[in-house]
Each structure stands twice: as structure tokens, then as C-alpha cells.
Amino acid sequence: MPCPGSVDSRGCSRVTTAPSSPAWKAVLFDLDGTLADTIELILLSYRHTMRTHLGEAPPDERFLATIGIPLPRQLADFARDAAEAERMRTTYVEYQREIHDDLVQPFPGAASALATLRERGTSLAVVTSKRSGVARRTLECCELWQSLDTVVCADEVERPKPDPEPVHLALDRLGLAHEANQVLFVGDSPFDLCAGRAAGTHTAAALWGPFSREVLAAEEPDFYLSDLEGVLHTSPSWS
């Protein structure tokens, strides 16, 4: 991909690679909308679920605005009671399982960006609001599973994103609990950026996801990235 899709949070011109710039000790990524292009999968599953239980699907924008938090919390906003929310979850999960592998793909540059970061000695992790089984399947379909040092999922924590707990868990697993300021968290949702900032990491807003730059700007990310290669042109010294 062409020279970097990375600009700092002050709107400065594109940063260039400097050989002497220190590498991140770790880069953490969100999964849906950041590494994996799953938006069509998510919307088809949402529409099917809403039509099954409500007769029609509310506007896509209502569901897209909640991408980045766990599915049960997303569906609770549409259900009339807790029992219906659980039935919706079952419908959503079963339908998505049927169509998942045909619709999931990595965003352009994902594999090469991870490979380059690994060559630099940077540890790699995913911090996602998916549950463990489907998160692994998504990463395997994208051929990214083997590139990661750890994956933190919603069912491994008590308080998922936007709480910093899953980010702290990733840092603990990577041995960087006291070096969060040498870590970058890349995500496409305000929930990602909020969690990363609260955990003490630098944050980068992925502009190829469903959230607008204006929405992401409210979380004051250190960097804005227009593509995954952009992460290669960021550094702790530039934020």
C-alpha cells in the first residue's frame, strides 16, 4: 500500500518512517471492523434476527452504532425482555455460524502489517468483544490466528470494552503490565479507543470501519489510520 495512512491526532501531515524511531513493544488490535471485514456478516445476522423476533429490522445504523460491545448487550436494546434477548442471541449466533466462513475476510494489508510488526520484535494481540470460539474462527478464516501472541475475548473478562479490563489482561499476558505507554491499541470503534486510553496505551483510530472520524475524534486518539499499513508508520515518540 502507498505511503502511510497515518496522521497524528493534531491533523498534521503524513508521518514518514524514521529508521531510528523506537518500535512499539506491542500492538493490540480490535477484530471486527479493524482486522476482519465482518460488517456484511454482522448486518445480515442482525436483520435475520430482528425479522425473526420483531417482524422487521430497525435501521442498520442503530445496530452499527453498538459494534464493539458484546452481542448480549447489543441485542438487549432491541428485546422486550431478558428472555427475548436470549432467544435473539441464539438466533443470531446460529444464523451467523451458517454464513460466517463465506463472508469473513481480512482487510487489505492485515497479514503483511502483522508480519512486519513481528519482524520488528513487536508483540501482537487481539482484544475483542467476540466470544472465544467465534473469535478464533474469524481469525482462522482470515489466516491471522498464527500471527498473534494472545487473544482476549469477552467471555474471559467480567467487564468487556469499553472498560479497560480486557486491555489490561492482554498487557498482563504479554508481560507489559507496567509498560502500557509503549503499547498501541488500534480499533475502529469509540469503545476500543476508550478502553485503550483508560488502560494507559496509545490509541489509533481505524477509519475503515463503520464509525465516522467525527465519532472517533471524541475519544481523542493519538493517531488516525486510513489503512492497516499506517500502523507501521507510527511510533511511541510521535504521539
Image: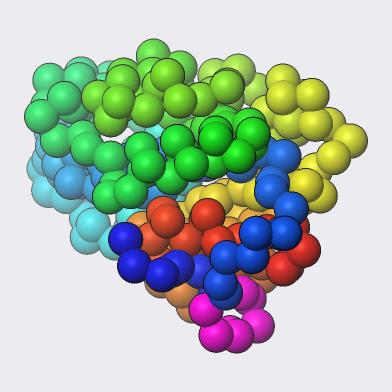
Image-based side of 61 in relation to 223, left or right: left
Residue bounds of the magenta highlight:
8-14
Of 109 and 166, nearer the camera is: 109
Task: Give the overall secondary structure of the magenta segment.
Answer: loop
Seen in the picture, residue 99 relative to 16 is either above or below; the reply is: above
Q: Is residue 237 visible?
A: yes
Tell me the residue at 45%/68% (across/down): 4
Going by the image, does 73 lie left or right of 40?
right
Q: Looking at the image, is 222 positioned above or below residue 95? A: below
Q: Is residue 178 left or right of residue 24?
A: right
Q: Residue at x 12, y 20 (%)?
A: 98
Which of the two residues, 190 or 80, is positioned nearer the viewer here?
A: 190
In the rendered image, residue 2, in percent from the top left (x then y), is placed at: 34, 67
Which residue is more in the foreground, 72 or 109?
109
Residue 19 covered by magenta stretch: no
Q: Of all residues shown, which one is farthest toward the top? A: 133
12 relative to 94, above or below: below
Give the farthest residue toward the right. 178
Q: Is residue 13 magenta?
A: yes
Up-down relation of residue 134 to residue 121 (above or below): above
In front: 239, or 94? Answer: 239
Instruction: Kindly identify the residue that appears in the image at 25 percent across and 24 percent down.
Output: 141
Tell me what residue is drawn at x 39 percent, y 14 percent: 133
Q: Position of residue 138 (x, y in %)?
A: 31, 26
Q: Which colouring convention does the figure follow? A: rainbow
Instruction: Point out residue 22 in the picture as x, y percentages from the top left corner.
Output: 74, 53
Please identify the quadrant where the C terminus is shown: bottom right
Q: Residue 37 location, x and y as percent? A: 27, 45
Q: Can residue 219 be seen from the camera position used here?
A: no
